[in-house]
Image (tube, helix red, strand yellow):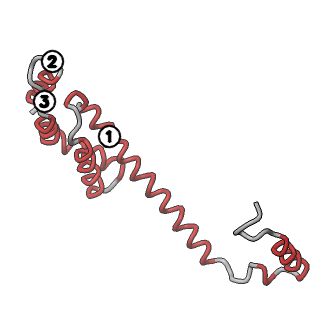
Amino acid sequence: MNAEISRLAKWASQARGLPAVPAEALLTALYRSHRLDLIRLAVLLVGDRETAEDIVQDVFARLHGRRPETLTLAYVRTCVLNGSRSVLRRRMVESRWTERGKEALDKPPGRGMATRGPGVRAAWRVKVRRSAPPWGCR
């Protein structure tokens, strides 16, 4: 398969007068010969085989329709690496938000305006009365 990829890449980089390499053929050759290596790379980063397979599939789906000159193994590896990083970033953000939600549920109720003194509540009422209505007064 590597010979087929190099042959297609050479064909793609030749002079303008020759017919262009179909991008689908080059992409298919890359997929058939390097899919497992790319999945292994994603598994090392993500730690989950199913997610790694999804990342590789998404990368090849995004690469469909690109010019053949851009379809190199290095570019595909970089795309898999970036896709894995995006998944890890989403996981990190999700874990932060779930931790914040758990902390908010663990806090005892009654920490709002009702527990503050009458002076603070009166000051808020004055502040609310002085503010302009939202529909006018520019």
Percent x, y of residue 76: 27, 37
**Nearest to the observer: residue 15 or residue 74:** 15
For the question of whether residue 40 can be seen, the reply is: no
Horizontally, is 14 left or right of 115 in the view? left
Name the mark nearer the viewer: 1 or 2.
2
Q: Are marks 1 and 2 in contact (CB under 8 Å)?
A: no
- Residue 92 appearing in the image: yes
Contact between marks 2 and 3 (CB within 8 A): the answer is: no
Q: Which residue is tagged 3?
A: 5
Q: CA distance from mark 2 to mark 3?
A: 20 Å
Q: Is residue 92 left or right of residue 123?
A: left
Residue type for callout 1: Cys
Amino acid type at mark 3: Ile
The residue tagged with tag 2: helix, strand or loop? loop
Left or right of 79: which side holds 96? right
Specify few, some or many for label 2: CA neighbours under 10 Å numbering under 14, 14-19, or 20 or more: few
- Residue 8's disc is none
Residue occupied by mark 2: 16
x then y, percent, for residue 86: 41, 49
Which quarter of the figure is the C terminus placed in?
bottom right
Left of 119 or right of it: where is 71?
left
The span from disc 1 to disc 2 (Cα, nearest Å) is 28 Å
Name which residue lies at 15% across and 35% down: 23
Within 10 Å of disc 1 (Cα), the crowding (few <14, some 14-19, many 20+) is many
> Circle 3: is it few (<14), some (14-19), or many (20+) Cα within 10 Å?
some
Residue at image point 81% right, 69% down: 131
Badge 2 amino acid: Arg
Q: CA distance from mark 1 to mark 3?
A: 18 Å
Q: Mark 1 sits on what residue?
A: 79
